[in-house]
Image (cartoon, rainbow, N blue to C red):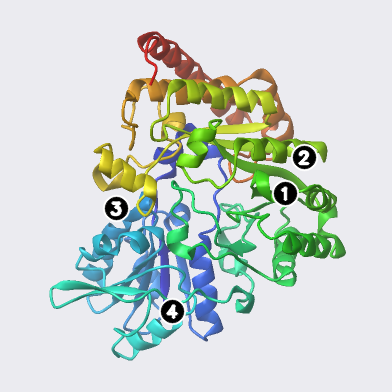
Amino acid sequence: MLFISPSYNRLKKLGGFSRYVPLSVPIGIGWLAGALMDAGKKVRILDEEVVGPCDDLLEEYVKDMEKPYIFGVSCMTASIKRGQEIASVIKEKFPDSKVLFGGIHPTVVPEEALQNPNVDVAIRGEAEETIPVLYDRLKNGQDFSDIKGLSFRRNGGFVHNPPAPLPDVTKLSKFPYFLFEQHSSAYELGFITSSRGCPYDCSFCSQRSISGRKYRFFPAEIVTETLDDIVNKYHRNYVTFLDDAFSTNKQRVMDLCREIRRRGLHKKALFDCQARGDAVDEEMLAAMRESGFRVINFGIETASERLMKLINKGETVEDIKRGVALAKKFGFKISGTFILGLPTETRKERAAAYRLAKEMDLDYVRFNNATPYPGTRLYQTAVEEGRLNPGKDWENLNACGTLVESPFREAPLAYVPLGASELALRCDILKYNLFYSFRPKSIFKILKERVGPAGWLALPPKWYLKPAEWFYLISFALKVAALFIKVFIYSLLTLFETR
């Protein structure tokens, strides 16, 4: 089976930052490939972000596979357009093949994927247990209509089978990083997932569409075996845990930290993770710090208790302030993300978010624009308000769009709350990002340490010895200067707007 990760156009989505944002391996595809290999199946992976468009590569990648060929295309919302193009190319070259779509976007809007006649099946949710069964049925020409978690066309309509049970992660093999070794210079292999799911129900997050609200975690032994590969085999000394809620289960964090120390991994690498302010305490933080954890990212979202309740975050601003203060006490560097442009939000509440970041003296900050991804309640709110503007093929759905766009071109925001103007919202997002992240001490910190939160920003080793990097950084600085000018103009134009 050939798994394909379609390009989502990093340059367009990340703008000038794309050069310094590490590229992770396609995690979802990796897990599915591992599940198929455990079942004795042959798999290959084609990632367009690494090898470029797959159109002329397909014959090479399937030449040693048996027909009928099966293709698995993993689509985020940002890559669904390219995924549809790939499906058409596949069917043109191999009419008898089977094309499966999976990932977050086909999970939440399967009928959109299936409107393309070249897509045979949409797989919803986690599929480690589904994909081997479906593979055998397709190879043997057998009916698959009883398999849970599938959506497909039948008799001119769509059939959506009941959801598949979530796989037992304690029975999965460790992540197959070896499948990506040949492109290790392109990938940042210092990423790992040690749990799945999130028990919370934030209105802006679509992840529960994949994993529900059931929180599951991998055994500490499996996690540290994988860490051992990342650190000792692939020589990564910064590793980011991609868990949505790393600190949810205290005992599992304590067990994991103990195993990291037992293996001596904390002496060779530093670790980053994401946590909630209401889910950390002194004992946990002390163990994490002793075990090599360096940066904690808190999803702060807003400084308004009113908005916290509105987005159903399940914690308070005071909880976050307490958690940040505790983490600082133990010497952690703190990264914080905010969401600006939430429903009913005012400019005063946006300004309060900036003041809160300064008050807590966060090391790294991102102010993202509220983005109504399919499958979220924010999406439903945007539809109900008549304020959803996804653009063609969802091109406007980019949480970092305002920050990374060209100074000379603006893509419309996917959502602007009722009563607010897009110009004022754009002004505030740009202003607070620039004013916070481009302070002299913030710039010096990145240039000196080279690595910010590993999932967001990293300069190449010894970048200061490379003339090309100096050229690029100077060019980037000029673009940032242009953004400051834009903010000044926007501020004048929106001086009297309160929303």
Q: How far apart are marks 2 and 3 (CA)?
A: 44 Å
Q: Label 1: which residue?
A: 280
**Sooner in the amino-acid sequence: mark 3 or mark 4:** 3
- In the rendered image, residue 490, in percent from the top left (x then y), is placed at 39, 14
Which residue is situated farthest in the left direction here? 156
Foreground label between 2 and 3: 2
Q: Label 2: which residue?
A: 326
- In the rendered image, residue 165, in percent from the top left (x then y), is placed at 47, 76
Residue type highlighted by circle 1:
Val
Would residue 281 be visible to someone looking at this image?
yes
Where disc 1 sits, the SS reads loop
Where disc 3 sits, the SS reads helix
Residue type highlighted by circle 3:
Lys
Q: How crowded is mark 2: few (under 14 residues within 10 Å), some or many (20 or more)?
A: some
Q: Distance between the residues labelled 2 and 1?
A: 8 Å
Where disc 4 sits, the SS reads helix
- In the rendered image, residue 273, in percent from the top left (x then y), is placed at 67, 49
Q: How far apart are marks 3 and 1 (CA)?
A: 40 Å
**Sooner in the amino-acid sequence: mark 2 or mark 3:** 3
Residue 107 to residue 438: above or below: below
Q: In which quarter of the image is residue 325?
A: top right
The residue shown at (81%, 47%) is: 282
Where disc 2 sits, the SS reads helix
The residue shown at (71%, 38%) is: 322
For the residue pair 258 and 174, the one nearer the viewer reads as: 258
Q: Label 3: which residue?
A: 81
The residue shown at (67%, 34%) is: 463
**Sooner in the amino-acid sequence: mark 2 or mark 1:** 1
Foreground label between 3 and 1: 1
User: Mark 2 touching mark 1, by CB under 8 A?
Assistant: yes
